[in-house]
Amino acid sequence: MAKKAKASARKKAAPKKRAATDYLADIGEWMVPGVHLRTLAEKKGMFAGAASSYGPIQEDVQFRETLAREYNMFAVANEMKCLRVHPERGCYDFTQSDEMVAFARAHDMQVHGHVLLWHISQPAWWTQLPATREGLMDALSQHIHTVAGHFHGKLYAWDVVNESLEGDGTLSPTLWYRRIGPDYCDHAFRWAHEVDPDVKLFYNDFAAESKCPKADGMYKLVRGMVDRGVPIHGVGIQAHVSVENAPPPDELAANIERYDKLGLEVQITELTVSVDPDNGTKEERLSKQAQVYYDITRVGVEAKNCTAVITWGLSDKHNWERDGERDDYVGTLPWDQRYRQKPACYAMKRAFMEG
Ligand code: 9MR
Protein backbone atom coordinates (compact mmCIF):
# COMPACT_ATOMS: atom_id res chain seq x y z
CA MET A 1 0.00 0.00 0.00
CA ALA A 2 1.52 3.27 -1.12
CA LYS A 3 1.42 5.95 1.55
CA LYS A 4 -0.48 9.10 0.76
CA ALA A 5 2.82 10.53 -0.42
CA LYS A 6 1.43 12.88 -3.01
CA ALA A 7 -1.43 13.90 -0.85
CA SER A 8 0.11 17.13 0.35
CA ALA A 9 0.42 18.29 -3.25
CA ARG A 10 -3.27 17.78 -3.82
CA LYS A 11 -5.62 20.68 -3.85
CA LYS A 12 -7.28 21.11 -0.46
CA ALA A 13 -10.53 22.66 -1.71
CA ALA A 14 -13.58 22.16 0.46
CA PRO A 15 -15.83 19.46 -0.97
CA LYS A 16 -18.45 20.96 -3.22
CA LYS A 17 -22.03 19.98 -2.54
CA ARG A 18 -23.55 17.69 -5.12
CA ALA A 19 -27.14 18.13 -6.06
CA ALA A 20 -29.15 15.73 -3.95
CA THR A 21 -30.54 13.86 -6.94
CA ASP A 22 -27.21 13.29 -8.73
CA TYR A 23 -26.68 9.84 -7.36
CA LEU A 24 -29.93 8.44 -8.55
CA ALA A 25 -29.56 9.97 -12.01
CA ASP A 26 -25.93 8.89 -12.33
CA ILE A 27 -26.07 5.35 -11.06
CA GLY A 28 -25.70 3.93 -14.56
CA GLU A 29 -22.34 5.61 -14.92
CA TRP A 30 -21.03 3.49 -12.07
CA MET A 31 -22.24 0.16 -13.32
CA VAL A 32 -18.79 -0.63 -14.65
CA PRO A 33 -17.27 -4.00 -13.83
CA GLY A 34 -13.99 -3.62 -12.05
CA VAL A 35 -14.69 -0.27 -10.42
CA HIS A 36 -14.46 -1.47 -6.87
CA LEU A 37 -14.06 0.62 -3.78
CA ARG A 38 -10.70 -0.96 -3.01
CA THR A 39 -9.34 -0.14 -6.47
CA LEU A 40 -10.35 3.49 -6.11
CA ALA A 41 -9.00 3.71 -2.56
CA GLU A 42 -5.71 2.11 -3.57
CA LYS A 43 -5.27 4.76 -6.25
CA LYS A 44 -5.35 7.33 -3.44
CA GLY A 45 -2.98 5.32 -1.25
CA MET A 46 -5.87 4.58 1.10
CA PHE A 47 -7.98 1.82 2.52
CA ALA A 48 -11.70 1.33 1.94
CA GLY A 49 -12.78 -0.77 4.88
CA ALA A 50 -15.77 -2.55 6.31
CA ALA A 51 -16.31 -4.06 9.73
CA SER A 52 -17.96 -7.38 10.27
CA SER A 53 -18.58 -9.90 12.96
CA TYR A 54 -18.00 -13.61 12.42
CA GLY A 55 -21.55 -14.68 11.46
CA PRO A 56 -21.97 -12.95 8.08
CA ILE A 57 -18.54 -14.06 6.91
CA GLN A 58 -19.26 -17.64 7.87
CA GLU A 59 -22.84 -17.91 6.70
CA ASP A 60 -23.43 -15.47 3.88
CA VAL A 61 -21.62 -16.08 0.59
CA GLN A 62 -22.75 -12.76 -0.88
CA PHE A 63 -21.44 -10.92 2.14
CA ARG A 64 -18.10 -12.67 1.92
CA GLU A 65 -17.77 -12.07 -1.81
CA THR A 66 -18.67 -8.40 -1.57
CA LEU A 67 -16.25 -7.86 1.29
CA ALA A 68 -13.35 -9.52 -0.50
CA ARG A 69 -14.08 -7.90 -3.85
CA GLU A 70 -14.71 -4.34 -2.73
CA TYR A 71 -12.58 -3.71 0.35
CA ASN A 72 -8.89 -3.68 1.15
CA MET A 73 -9.31 -3.25 4.91
CA PHE A 74 -11.30 -5.34 7.32
CA ALA A 75 -12.23 -4.32 10.86
CA VAL A 76 -13.04 -7.12 13.26
CA ALA A 77 -16.26 -5.86 14.84
CA ASN A 78 -16.66 -8.01 17.94
CA GLU A 79 -14.38 -11.04 18.00
CA MET A 80 -11.29 -9.35 19.47
CA LYS A 81 -13.24 -7.76 22.32
CA CYS A 82 -12.27 -8.94 25.79
CA LEU A 83 -15.58 -10.73 26.30
CA ARG A 84 -14.84 -12.88 23.24
CA VAL A 85 -11.12 -13.57 23.46
CA HIS A 86 -10.69 -13.60 27.24
CA PRO A 87 -13.99 -14.76 28.80
CA GLU A 88 -12.42 -16.20 31.97
CA ARG A 89 -9.29 -14.82 33.57
CA GLY A 90 -6.31 -16.49 31.92
CA CYS A 91 -8.47 -18.44 29.40
CA TYR A 92 -8.14 -17.08 25.90
CA ASP A 93 -10.03 -18.16 22.79
CA PHE A 94 -8.81 -16.83 19.44
CA THR A 95 -10.65 -19.34 17.24
CA GLN A 96 -13.00 -16.90 15.51
CA SER A 97 -10.67 -13.91 15.43
CA ASP A 98 -7.90 -16.05 13.90
CA GLU A 99 -10.26 -17.25 11.17
CA MET A 100 -11.24 -13.67 10.43
CA VAL A 101 -7.63 -12.52 10.18
CA ALA A 102 -6.90 -15.50 7.89
CA PHE A 103 -9.86 -14.52 5.69
CA ALA A 104 -8.54 -10.99 5.38
CA ARG A 105 -5.02 -12.14 4.57
CA ALA A 106 -6.32 -14.61 1.96
CA HIS A 107 -8.03 -11.71 0.20
CA ASP A 108 -5.21 -9.23 0.49
CA MET A 109 -6.98 -7.05 3.03
CA GLN A 110 -5.32 -5.30 5.94
CA VAL A 111 -6.89 -5.75 9.37
CA HIS A 112 -7.93 -3.01 11.77
CA GLY A 113 -8.05 -4.69 15.19
CA HIS A 114 -10.75 -3.69 17.67
CA VAL A 115 -10.26 -3.41 20.69
CA LEU A 116 -7.80 -3.90 23.55
CA LEU A 117 -9.41 -1.76 26.25
CA TRP A 118 -13.08 -0.80 26.39
CA HIS A 119 -15.39 -0.65 29.41
CA ILE A 120 -18.18 -2.36 27.40
CA SER A 121 -18.21 -6.05 26.38
CA GLN A 122 -16.03 -6.86 29.37
CA PRO A 123 -16.41 -10.21 31.16
CA ALA A 124 -17.55 -10.08 34.78
CA TRP A 125 -14.22 -11.26 36.18
CA TRP A 126 -12.76 -7.75 35.90
CA THR A 127 -15.08 -6.52 38.63
CA GLN A 128 -14.08 -9.40 40.89
CA LEU A 129 -10.37 -8.57 40.91
CA PRO A 130 -8.75 -7.48 44.20
CA ALA A 131 -9.55 -3.79 44.58
CA THR A 132 -5.99 -2.56 44.27
CA ARG A 133 -4.28 -0.50 41.60
CA GLU A 134 -1.57 -3.14 41.24
CA GLY A 135 -4.11 -5.95 40.80
CA LEU A 136 -5.85 -4.18 37.95
CA MET A 137 -2.59 -3.02 36.33
CA ASP A 138 -1.36 -6.59 36.41
CA ALA A 139 -4.54 -8.04 34.85
CA LEU A 140 -4.67 -5.33 32.21
CA SER A 141 -1.05 -5.67 31.19
CA GLN A 142 -1.44 -9.46 30.95
CA HIS A 143 -4.55 -9.06 28.78
CA ILE A 144 -2.94 -6.56 26.42
CA HIS A 145 0.37 -8.41 26.23
CA THR A 146 -1.41 -11.68 25.44
CA VAL A 147 -3.92 -10.38 22.89
CA ALA A 148 -1.63 -7.92 21.09
CA GLY A 149 1.14 -10.52 21.29
CA HIS A 150 -1.09 -13.18 19.73
CA PHE A 151 -1.69 -11.01 16.67
CA HIS A 152 1.89 -9.80 16.45
CA GLY A 153 2.75 -8.82 12.88
CA LYS A 154 -0.72 -9.60 11.54
CA LEU A 155 -2.61 -6.33 11.95
CA TYR A 156 -2.28 -2.89 10.40
CA ALA A 157 -3.71 -1.16 13.46
CA TRP A 158 -5.20 -1.70 16.90
CA ASP A 159 -7.83 0.37 18.61
CA VAL A 160 -6.00 0.30 21.91
CA VAL A 161 -8.45 2.38 23.92
CA ASN A 162 -12.05 2.87 22.83
CA GLU A 163 -14.61 5.45 23.95
CA SER A 164 -12.98 6.58 27.17
CA LEU A 165 -14.40 10.12 27.00
CA GLU A 166 -17.61 11.75 28.21
CA GLY A 167 -19.56 14.22 26.08
CA ASP A 168 -17.81 17.12 27.81
CA GLY A 169 -14.42 15.76 26.79
CA THR A 170 -13.32 14.52 30.22
CA LEU A 171 -12.31 10.93 30.93
CA SER A 172 -15.23 8.71 31.95
CA PRO A 173 -15.16 7.33 35.50
CA THR A 174 -14.58 3.75 34.34
CA LEU A 175 -13.03 1.00 36.40
CA TRP A 176 -9.61 1.79 34.87
CA TYR A 177 -9.90 5.48 35.60
CA ARG A 178 -11.04 4.98 39.18
CA ARG A 179 -8.51 2.33 40.13
CA ILE A 180 -5.49 3.17 37.99
CA GLY A 181 -5.92 6.91 37.42
CA PRO A 182 -5.90 9.10 34.33
CA ASP A 183 -2.66 7.56 33.04
CA TYR A 184 -4.32 4.21 32.31
CA CYS A 185 -4.43 5.04 28.58
CA ASP A 186 -0.67 5.68 28.52
CA HIS A 187 -0.02 2.26 30.07
CA ALA A 188 -2.34 0.49 27.63
CA PHE A 189 -0.52 1.95 24.62
CA ARG A 190 2.91 1.18 26.10
CA TRP A 191 2.00 -2.46 26.81
CA ALA A 192 0.68 -2.94 23.27
CA HIS A 193 3.80 -1.37 21.78
CA GLU A 194 6.05 -3.63 23.86
CA VAL A 195 4.70 -6.79 22.26
CA ASP A 196 4.00 -5.53 18.72
CA PRO A 197 6.21 -2.53 17.97
CA ASP A 198 5.19 -2.32 14.31
CA VAL A 199 1.39 -2.24 14.60
CA LYS A 200 -0.18 1.22 14.56
CA LEU A 201 -1.86 2.09 17.82
CA PHE A 202 -5.08 4.11 17.72
CA TYR A 203 -7.35 5.91 20.15
CA ASN A 204 -10.96 5.50 18.86
CA ASP A 205 -14.12 7.40 19.80
CA PHE A 206 -17.57 8.56 18.63
CA ALA A 207 -19.33 11.94 18.55
CA ALA A 208 -15.97 13.65 18.01
CA GLU A 209 -16.29 14.45 14.31
CA SER A 210 -17.12 18.14 14.31
CA LYS A 211 -16.28 21.08 16.51
CA CYS A 212 -17.52 20.17 20.00
CA PRO A 213 -16.21 19.70 23.56
CA LYS A 214 -15.74 15.96 23.05
CA ALA A 215 -13.65 16.45 19.89
CA ASP A 216 -11.52 18.96 21.80
CA GLY A 217 -11.25 16.57 24.76
CA MET A 218 -10.08 13.81 22.43
CA TYR A 219 -7.49 16.11 20.87
CA LYS A 220 -6.26 17.15 24.33
CA LEU A 221 -6.02 13.53 25.50
CA VAL A 222 -4.10 12.48 22.40
CA ARG A 223 -1.82 15.53 22.36
CA GLY A 224 -0.95 14.84 26.00
CA MET A 225 0.04 11.30 25.07
CA VAL A 226 2.19 12.53 22.19
CA ASP A 227 3.86 15.08 24.51
CA ARG A 228 4.63 12.35 27.05
CA GLY A 229 6.21 10.14 24.39
CA VAL A 230 3.45 7.52 24.54
CA PRO A 231 3.52 5.30 21.42
CA ILE A 232 0.28 6.45 19.78
CA HIS A 233 0.14 6.54 16.00
CA GLY A 234 -3.42 7.29 15.06
CA VAL A 235 -6.90 8.44 15.90
CA GLY A 236 -10.13 6.72 14.95
CA ILE A 237 -13.03 9.06 14.28
CA GLN A 238 -15.97 6.66 14.32
CA ALA A 239 -18.56 8.77 12.46
CA HIS A 240 -21.81 7.12 13.46
CA VAL A 241 -23.77 10.07 12.12
CA SER A 242 -27.20 10.99 10.88
CA VAL A 243 -28.39 12.93 7.85
CA GLU A 244 -30.13 15.36 10.15
CA ASN A 245 -27.03 16.01 12.26
CA ALA A 246 -24.15 15.37 9.90
CA PRO A 247 -20.73 16.86 10.71
CA PRO A 248 -20.00 19.98 8.64
CA PRO A 249 -17.23 18.93 6.21
CA ASP A 250 -15.01 21.92 7.05
CA GLU A 251 -15.14 21.09 10.77
CA LEU A 252 -14.32 17.44 10.16
CA ALA A 253 -11.44 18.47 7.88
CA ALA A 254 -10.03 20.86 10.50
CA ASN A 255 -10.34 18.18 13.16
CA ILE A 256 -8.39 15.67 11.06
CA GLU A 257 -5.78 18.24 10.11
CA ARG A 258 -4.89 19.07 13.71
CA TYR A 259 -3.86 15.43 14.21
CA ASP A 260 -1.60 15.72 11.20
CA LYS A 261 0.22 18.51 13.02
CA LEU A 262 0.86 15.99 15.83
CA GLY A 263 2.25 13.55 13.24
CA LEU A 264 -0.73 11.21 13.60
CA GLU A 265 -2.73 9.19 11.14
CA VAL A 266 -6.53 9.38 11.19
CA GLN A 267 -9.03 6.79 10.05
CA ILE A 268 -12.80 7.14 9.78
CA THR A 269 -13.38 3.90 11.62
CA GLU A 270 -17.10 3.15 11.96
CA LEU A 271 -19.00 5.19 9.39
CA THR A 272 -22.77 4.73 9.32
CA VAL A 273 -25.34 7.30 8.22
CA SER A 274 -28.85 7.01 9.60
CA VAL A 275 -31.77 8.95 8.22
CA ASP A 276 -35.05 9.89 9.86
CA PRO A 277 -37.62 7.49 8.34
CA ASP A 278 -40.15 10.32 8.13
CA ASN A 279 -37.75 12.65 6.33
CA GLY A 280 -39.05 12.45 2.73
CA THR A 281 -39.60 9.67 0.23
CA LYS A 282 -37.33 6.64 0.14
CA GLU A 283 -35.50 8.06 -2.89
CA GLU A 284 -34.99 11.40 -1.16
CA ARG A 285 -33.66 9.72 1.96
CA LEU A 286 -31.26 7.54 -0.02
CA SER A 287 -30.05 10.61 -1.83
CA LYS A 288 -29.53 12.66 1.34
CA GLN A 289 -27.72 9.75 2.89
CA ALA A 290 -25.46 9.52 -0.17
CA GLN A 291 -24.55 13.19 0.19
CA VAL A 292 -23.33 12.60 3.73
CA TYR A 293 -21.35 9.51 2.66
CA TYR A 294 -19.85 11.62 -0.11
CA ASP A 295 -18.94 14.55 2.14
CA ILE A 296 -17.28 12.43 4.83
CA THR A 297 -15.39 10.21 2.40
CA ARG A 298 -14.22 13.19 0.38
CA VAL A 299 -12.90 14.95 3.46
CA GLY A 300 -10.99 11.76 4.29
CA VAL A 301 -9.58 11.47 0.79
CA GLU A 302 -8.45 15.10 0.77
CA ALA A 303 -6.83 14.99 4.20
CA LYS A 304 -3.21 14.03 3.79
CA ASN A 305 -3.12 12.02 7.05
CA CYS A 306 -6.40 10.11 6.63
CA THR A 307 -5.58 6.57 5.55
CA ALA A 308 -8.94 4.77 5.67
CA VAL A 309 -12.67 5.15 5.47
CA ILE A 310 -14.24 2.14 7.19
CA THR A 311 -17.98 1.51 7.44
CA TRP A 312 -19.37 -0.32 10.47
CA GLY A 313 -20.85 -3.16 8.49
CA LEU A 314 -21.38 -3.49 4.78
CA SER A 315 -24.92 -4.45 3.89
CA ASP A 316 -28.24 -3.54 5.47
CA LYS A 317 -28.95 -7.26 5.59
CA HIS A 318 -26.70 -7.49 8.65
CA ASN A 319 -27.27 -4.05 10.08
CA TRP A 320 -26.76 -3.55 13.81
CA GLU A 321 -28.90 -0.41 13.59
CA ARG A 322 -31.86 -2.16 11.92
CA ASP A 323 -35.10 -0.38 12.71
CA GLY A 324 -37.84 -2.83 11.90
CA GLU A 325 -39.30 -4.19 8.71
CA ARG A 326 -40.68 -1.12 6.97
CA ASP A 327 -41.12 -1.56 3.22
CA ASP A 328 -39.36 1.74 2.59
CA TYR A 329 -36.48 0.84 4.93
CA VAL A 330 -33.32 2.82 4.35
CA GLY A 331 -30.52 1.26 6.37
CA THR A 332 -27.35 3.01 7.38
CA LEU A 333 -24.83 1.15 5.20
CA PRO A 334 -23.63 1.39 1.57
CA TRP A 335 -25.14 -1.91 0.29
CA ASP A 336 -28.81 -2.81 0.57
CA GLN A 337 -30.31 -6.03 1.91
CA ARG A 338 -29.84 -7.71 -1.50
CA TYR A 339 -26.27 -6.52 -1.95
CA ARG A 340 -27.20 -3.90 -4.50
CA GLN A 341 -25.13 -0.75 -4.30
CA LYS A 342 -27.09 2.03 -2.66
CA PRO A 343 -26.56 5.64 -3.71
CA ALA A 344 -24.32 5.82 -0.62
CA CYS A 345 -21.98 3.28 -2.18
CA TYR A 346 -21.77 5.21 -5.45
CA ALA A 347 -21.19 8.34 -3.43
CA MET A 348 -18.19 6.79 -1.68
CA LYS A 349 -16.79 5.74 -5.03
CA ARG A 350 -17.25 9.23 -6.45
CA ALA A 351 -15.54 10.73 -3.43
CA PHE A 352 -12.54 8.43 -3.84
CA MET A 353 -12.37 9.43 -7.51
CA GLU A 354 -12.99 13.15 -7.11
CA GLY A 355 -11.17 13.88 -3.86
O1 9MR B 1 -21.67 -3.50 16.44
C1 9MR B 1 -21.26 -3.98 17.72
C2 9MR B 1 -22.36 -4.83 18.32
O2 9MR B 1 -22.57 -5.97 17.55
C3 9MR B 1 -21.95 -5.20 19.74
O3 9MR B 1 -23.03 -5.90 20.36
C4 9MR B 1 -21.63 -3.98 20.55
C5 9MR B 1 -21.12 -4.32 21.96
O4 9MR B 1 -19.92 -5.04 21.92
O5 9MR B 1 -20.59 -3.23 19.91
C6 9MR B 1 -20.96 -2.80 18.62
O6 9MR B 1 -19.86 -2.10 18.07
C7 9MR B 1 -19.52 -0.85 18.68
C8 9MR B 1 -18.01 -0.72 18.64
O7 9MR B 1 -17.41 -1.84 19.27
C9 9MR B 1 -17.54 0.57 19.28
N1 9MR B 1 -18.22 1.71 18.69
C10 9MR B 1 -19.67 1.63 18.62
C11 9MR B 1 -20.08 0.34 17.90
C12 9MR B 1 -21.58 0.28 17.72
O8 9MR B 1 -22.22 0.28 18.96
Image (cartoon, rainbow, N blue to C red):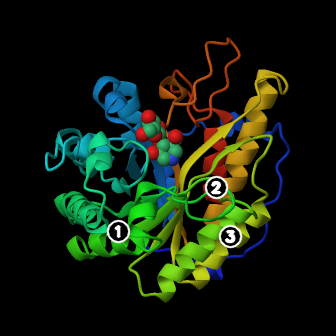
Q: Which mark is residue 216?
A: 3
User: Which structural element holds mark 1?
Assistant: helix
Picture residue at 21% right of the left edge, 65% below the top: 145
- Asked if disc 3 and disc 2 are in contact, CB closer than 8 Å, the reply is no
Residue at which label 2 appears: 297
- The response on whether ligand 1 sits within 8 Å of label 3 is no
Q: Amino acid at mark 3?
A: Asp
Tell me which numbered mark, 1 or 3, is placed earlier along the sequence: 1
Nearer to us in this view, 104 or 86: 86
Q: Secondary structure at mark 2?
A: helix
The residue singled out by tag 1 in the image is 188
- The reply to whether residue 304 is in sight is no
Spatial CA distance of label 2 from label 1 is 30 Å
Cα gap from disc 1 to disc 3, whole angstroms: 21 Å
Label placed on residue 213: none
**Is residue 230 placed above or below 169 in the rendered structure?**
below
Left or right of residue 263: residue 99: left
**Furthest residue toward left:** 91
Instruction: Using a 10 Å C-alpha cutoff, classify the residue at mark 3 as few (fewer than 14 neighbours), some (14 to 19) or many (20 or more).
Output: some
Q: Is the residue marked by circle 1 packed among few (<14), some (14-19), or many (20+) residues within 10 Å? A: many
Image coords of residue 65 (percent x, y): 37, 34
Q: Position of residue 49 (x, y in %)?
A: 46, 50
Q: Mark 1 belongs to which amino acid?
A: Ala
Q: Place residue 139 in its image quadrant.
A: bottom left
Side (left or right) of 286 relative to 147: right
Please tell me how crowded label 2 is: few (under 14), some (14-19), or many (20+) other residues with Cα within 10 Å: many
Asked whether residue 216 appears in the rendered view, the answer is yes
